[in-house]
Amino acid sequence: MAVEYDASRVTLVDHPLVQHKLSILRNKDTGTNQFRKLVRELAYFGGYEAMRDLPLEDVEVETPICASTFKQLAGRKLAVVPILRAGLGMVDGILDLVPSARVGHIGMERDEVTHEPHEYYCKMPKDIDQRTCLVVDPMLATGGSAEMAVGYLRGRGVKDIRMLCIVAAPEGLKALTDRDPDVHIYTCAIDECLNEDAYIVPGLGDAGDRIFGTL
Ligand code: PRP
Ligand code: URA
């Protein structure tokens, strides 16, 4: 039976360049070096979509021709929050877009048998509650890791949380949208299902191992 989730809270980033790069990423023969580059590039494209609604303010600029009014980002503070390890591979792609964003880390590892995540590290900017948080992790499988990360940030008083992944399973989209009433999810693909090991099908395998070459 199909897993139902609130599709209004999910944005599929399906630009042709994204689909092309993601097909290379999925290929089991793509090596660590190229995999890492592609994860960074896909984070850039996904981040571009996830920040589409950031507020702007007027700014006076003098061009070589005349002075006029233009737009700049209105001082909204941002934080990128990678879920370790695999989320680390997406950080530089986001920082390419917003170089002054702060970075908060959440270390989380799934138990191989129960598939439940356990947290092993956490370090956030002090003013995290004042920031728009973009949580990044290439894989949203059962959704357990993302749920725990979003729950932690809510506990720290963060109001605006966006989740950016590269491949999501319907099960993870349901779990996260059911768990949190406001989080919006951006993903480059929505795959078919999970297998008995809670890996995404067809997916791309173990993202952390492929990024860091620990296969
Ligand atoms: C992977 C992945 C996500 C999580 C997704 O991390 O990077 O964090 O699993 O699965 P879930 O949605 O079912 O929680 P893993 O625990 O393998 O750790 P790693 O990034 O250190 O390899
Ligand atoms: N974690 C991964 O890295 N890949 C999956 O398919 C599921 C969880």
Image (tube, helix red, strand yellow):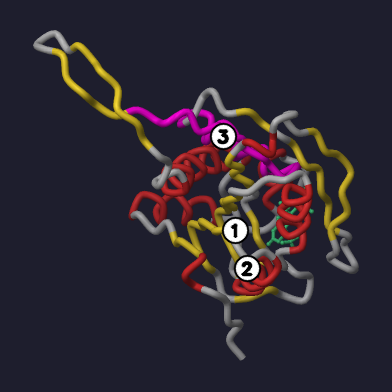
Task: Give me the residue at 57% from left, 51% from top.
Answer: 162
How crowded is the residue under tag 1: few (<14 C-alpha within 10 Å), some, or many (20+)?
some
Determine whether 59 is above or below 209 in the image. above
Secondary structure of the residue carrying tag 2 is helix
CB under 8 Å between discs 1 and 2: yes
Please name the residue shown 57% across and 77% down the image.
5
How would you rate the neighbour count of disc 2 (Cα within 10 Å): few for under 14, some for 14-19, many for 20 or more? many
Q: Which is more N-terminal, label 2 or label 1?
A: 2
Magenta range is 72-97
Comparing 117 with 64, the one in front is 64
Q: Vertically, is 170 above or below 20?
A: below
Q: What residue would you read off at disc 1?
A: 183
92 left or right of 54 in image:
right
Cα distance in 3D space between marks 3 and 2: 22 Å
User: Which residue is nearer to you in this view: 197 or 73?
Assistant: 73
Seen in the image, is 67 located left or right of residue 8?
A: left
Residue furthest left in the image: 65
Mark before the other along the chain sequence, 3 or 2: 3
10 Å crowding of disc 3: few (<14), some (14-19), many (20+): many
Q: Position of residue 101 (x, y in %)?
A: 57, 28
Label 3: which residue? 78
CA gap between label 1 and label 3 equals 15 Å
Residue in the picture at 54% in, 23% down:
100
Badge 3 element: strand
Is 90 included in the stretch rendered in magenta? yes
Determine the quadrant in which ligand 2 lies.
bottom right
- Label 1 SS: loop
Q: Residue at x 89, y 68 (%)?
A: 114
Quadrant showing the N terminus? bottom right
Q: Which mark is residue 177?
A: 2
